[in-house]
Amino acid sequence: MSTDELAVMDNGKCILQVQGIRPFFSDKFDITKHPQYKYLLDSSKKNYFDIEKYLRRRLTVRPDDVFECCELEAPPAPEEPAG
């Protein structure tokens, strides 16, 4: 397809490019008809996942928690080439 043809392509169509096969023309899938749609943010704002908040969460250590301690040594750094 030329750039002009892509610009006026039907909104219900798409071109899929999957590794190992040639790109192909297809109908778009209506995600609202998928059984798992209810879990998407598009379905409900309560499904919002705040990755920043998740990453800031701190581990809570209790007195009776058991941990295994290991001592590790870093491999020696590669030598810089003379130059």
Image (cartoon, rainbow, N blue to C red):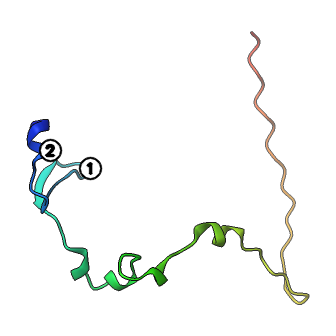
Residue type at mark 1: give it: Gln
Q: Who is closer to the viewer here, 13 or 80? A: 13
Tell me if mark 2 has few (under 14), some (14-19) or many (20+) residues whose alpha carbon lies within 10 angstroms of its own. Answer: few
Under circle 1, the secondary element is loop
User: Which residue is under mark 2?
Assistant: 7
* 34 over 75 or under it: above or below: below
Q: Position of residue 4 (x, y in %)?
A: 10, 38
Residue type at mark 2: give it: Ala
Number of numbered discs: 2
- Does residue 1 appear to the left or right of 83 in the view shown? left
Q: Quadrant of the N terminus?
A: top left
Residue displayed at 25% across by 75% down: 31
Q: Who is closer to the viewer here, 34 or 12? A: 12
Residue sitting at the far right? 63
- Does residue 3 appear to the left or right of 80 in the view shown? left
Mark earlier in primary sequence (2, 1): 2
Under circle 2, the secondary element is helix
Q: Quadrant of residue 69?
A: bottom right
User: Which residue is under mark 1?
Assistant: 19
Query: Which of the two discs, 2 and 1, sits closer to the camera?
Result: 2
Q: Quadrant of the C terminus?
A: top right
Q: Position of residue 40 (x, y in %)?
A: 39, 78
* 58 over 75 or under it: above or below: below
Q: Position of residue 32 (x, y in %)?
A: 25, 79
Q: Who is closer to the viewer here, 17 or 82? A: 17
Q: Position of residue 15 (x, y in %)?
A: 16, 52
CA gap, disc 2 to disc 1? 24 Å
